[in-house]
Image (cartoon, rainbow, N blue to C red):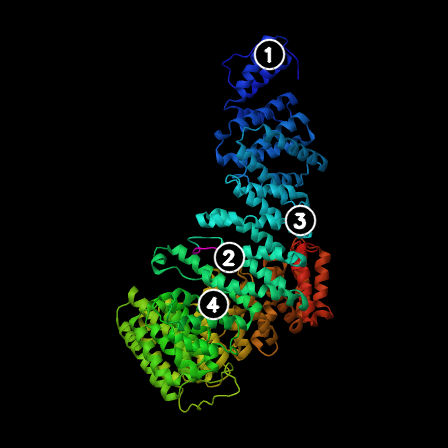
Amino acid sequence: MERRAEAPPPQGLDFTVENVEKALHQLYYDPNIENKNLAQKWLMQAQVSPQAWHFSWLLLHMDKVPEIQYFGASALHIKISRYWNDIPADQYESLKSQLFTHITRFASGSKIVLTRLCVALASLALSMMPEAWPCAVADMVRMFQAEDSNVDGRARCLALLELLTVLPEEFQTSRLPQYRKGQKVLKCFSSWVQLEIPLMDCENLIQAAFTSLQDPELFDTAVEAVVNAISQPDAQRYVNTLLKLIPPVLGLQEQLRQAVQSGDMETSHGICRIAVALGENHSRALLDQVEHWQSFLALVNMIMFCTGIPGHYPVNETTSSLTLTFWYTLQDDILSFEPDKQAVYQQVYRPVYFQLVDVLLHKAQFPSDEEYGFWSSDEKEQFRIYRVDISDTLMYVYEMLGAELLSSLYDKLGRLLTNTEQPSTWQHTEALLYGFQSIAETIDVNYSDVVPGLIGLIPRISISNVQLADTVMFTIGSLSEWLADHPVMINNVLPLVLQALGNPELSISSVSTLKKICRECKYDLPPYAANIVAVSQEVLMKQIHKTSQCMWLMQALGFLLSALQVEEILKNLHSLITPYIQQLEKLADETPNPSNRLAIIHILGLLSNLFTTLDISHHDDDHESTEVKKLPVQQGPNPVVVVLQQVFQLIQKVLSKWLNDAQVVESVCAIFEKSVKTLLDDFAPMVPQLCEMLGQMYSTIPQVSAIELTRQLVHIFAHEPAHFPPIKALFLLVTSVTLTLFQQGPRDHPDIVDSFMQLLAQALKRKPDLFLCSNLDVKAVFQCGVLSLKFPEAPTVKASCGFFTELLPRCGEIAPVGQVVHENGKALLQAVLEGIGGQASRSLMDHFAEILFALNKHCFSLLSVWIKEAMQQDGFPSARVTPEQKENFSQQILSRERVNKRRVKEMVKEFTLLCRGLHGTEYTADY
């Protein structure tokens, strides 16, 4: 810095970089003491001016001398420490980032400037903690650990040490209120302890944090500090320290009880977090300390109190949900011991888990009807999810308590329902049933000796509430498999289900339960069929249920009718669908409008769901028992086909006006897709009519549902000589329409292309003669397949690969296929290599390998020429592979190992990694 005297700066001079530098010259080098004082006074004003935010950073440029840089850093510190409230919150992150950047730059520079910048950052951290920068200290350490090519490691370490040195000094001299200082200490500890500092080295600080829990101002921060300290992954190595933490945790019980009594949810929540953190993270380590078993049991009982904390979740408390995972962990740890040790712990903890069941069932109880009526929809949904969590816990606890748990629940329910002197609330009954249902839904209770008694008790329940009725329904549904083995008990519960079916508030529970019963017990339901159909029909016609439940109900009836005699099936089918046939006929005559459209789609959906489960083949592998129930052999035409033919005529009438509506067409396809799957060969009489209808639909609006149904017909009927002509005509029409779609731009229809490729593969697999048709443009089909290999959608590419792996083996037997492959096979190989080279997802490499394997096996001489020509292209299939690597891959593909499909797949996977620049990286492990 050149030393020369300058005139004193005018008092009204602007606070610019140039003027600040002149004033600093004057302060340091002007021999006139009066000028020095004037400069000092002016610079002090400059430091606190709004312009300081601008000139401070400019003064820190690396081409400035240290004196100027120091003033810039000091000005920043003054602005941050004294005028914090002037800084907008949205500028905090920018300020933090700029300070880090400058500290990194000065790590190898002037020490006095580095120190001042560290003081500024420390002041920033203290001002932002804990709200805006909760983990400030840990973040700072991580920032300085990050690699920076411009700063050597030693300089970064020195900068970090300087920051950690000035941080407590700045803390002591800061103007923060005392409670804020306490918060800062706890926050600092909370951040540091996450860096896996040995727990034994933190004992005093943890105890101080426990003490701070008594200060309302410090409570939340102290909770975080204690939980972070206890939750260290490495903490269980310090068992003695963990044991020392149990007494102070237990010492919080009185504070917890007072918080619960006063309704202080935040305090009870925080204390519970501490207890659960200690128990859940270290239960195995603490269980191992046998001599301290009573101490740990006391902690378990404290967590039990938290689980059963008074009030209804989530309105009166939000604490109990925190504890549920602890009970999983404790049970897993107990059951992981060797048998002898496990038996000892079972003796201590089985009573605890029985108590837990009582607590959980109490917590699962609904509030009074009046109170529940005031809950918001969000609170009700949170309570529903909470009950599901309780249900999962009860199911898990069954592993510990076994059949004795079911007996306990049954005994309590029995006493509840038979005690006339002390009538129980519906909430108590519902909770016990809910507990039983939770277990029965997932555990095999077929051999439980309490289920018969439970089935006998259910009709005695006075159902005066929707929630109770729902649970009764779900409980019956969970026992449907048991009912199938004990059909004599069906009549005990079926009337309840049919009665509930008429209540729209019980829609989901009643319909799903009836569906389960009809599916599991269908061979024992014929005596009840007429009643079930009548009640269901009445409910359906009243339209009291949502669409999805109506569909389930139709599926239930399909299961039911499947087990009846032919004449009974026809009778009930006609009774069931006649009203819908009449409605559909009326709708078909009306002028199309949005209301009609929805009604048509709804009726078609109902019929589709009915035919989904209406299977009278009786090849029921699910129904095997020691007593095989003999079913009558069906005589005469299939009753389902008889009804379906009537429906078919009406559908043709509907399509005469709705053929251009994609959703109506999709609904029509769904009916026949389900019917074909269910009826199989019995569907044969309708094949010609359906092929003709499908052709009309696909010609009007090409869509996936029509292709999928065509594929099914090809799969089931194409090999039958009698059905080959209509299926051939349909196949050619679908192919022709789809090829036209390719000419117009297929990228907008990847789903259609996907289904079309699957149809082609199915045709080659089931009836390759379809490719001998003179009307089939095999070359165009081949070219479409090649184009489909380049689609971005993985399912479409996969389907295209499947087409070629079916096509290539037909080169020798189907002349048109052989000719097309000979003339266009090089384009196929080119597309495959492009995909392997990086154009396609790596998940598809096995499918591309399948094509290479097929080319090798069926077109070896051609492949030898094509692959050599392809690999001679510069940068193909990737600029990342060398000519030597390409040559090596080609030789591997053509070597004797080409007959080993697994090895070909390995070659492709290795080559695609080279092409993508991933060979030898961590991504290789994905393979």
Which of the marked residues, 2 or 4, is nearer the chain's N terminus? 2
Q: Is residue 568 visible?
A: yes
In the picture, the disc for residue 241 is: 3
Which of the marked residues, 1 or 2, is nearer the chain's N terminus? 1
Mark nearer the viewer, 1 or 2: 2
Asked whether 594 falls inside the magenta stretch, the response is: no
| Residue that label 1 marks | 36
Name above or below for residue 76 compared with residue 130: above
Proximity of marks 4 and 1: CB atoms separated by less than 8 Å = no
Mark 2 burial class by Cα count in 10 Å: few <14, some 14-19, many 20+: many
Give the CA distance from mark 3 to mark 2: 26 Å
Please tell me which residue lies in front, 711 or 426: 426
Choose top left, top right, bottom left or bottom right for residue 744: bottom left
Which of the marked residues, 4 or 3, is nearer the chain's N terminus? 3
Please tell me which residue lies in front, 47 or 715: 47
Give the CA distance from mark 4 to mark 3: 39 Å
Name above or below for residue 20 compared with residue 394: above
Mark 2 belongs to which amino acid? Thr
Proximity of marks 2 and 4: CB atoms separated by less than 8 Å = no
Please tell me which residue lies in front, 349 or 194: 349
Instruction: Find numbered disc 3 in the image and state the secondary structure of the residue it sits on.
Output: helix
Mark 3 belongs to which amino acid? Thr
Q: Point out residue 68 in the picture as x, y percentages from the top left corner.
A: 62, 21
| Residue that label 2 marks | 307
Mark 4 belongs to which amino acid? Gly
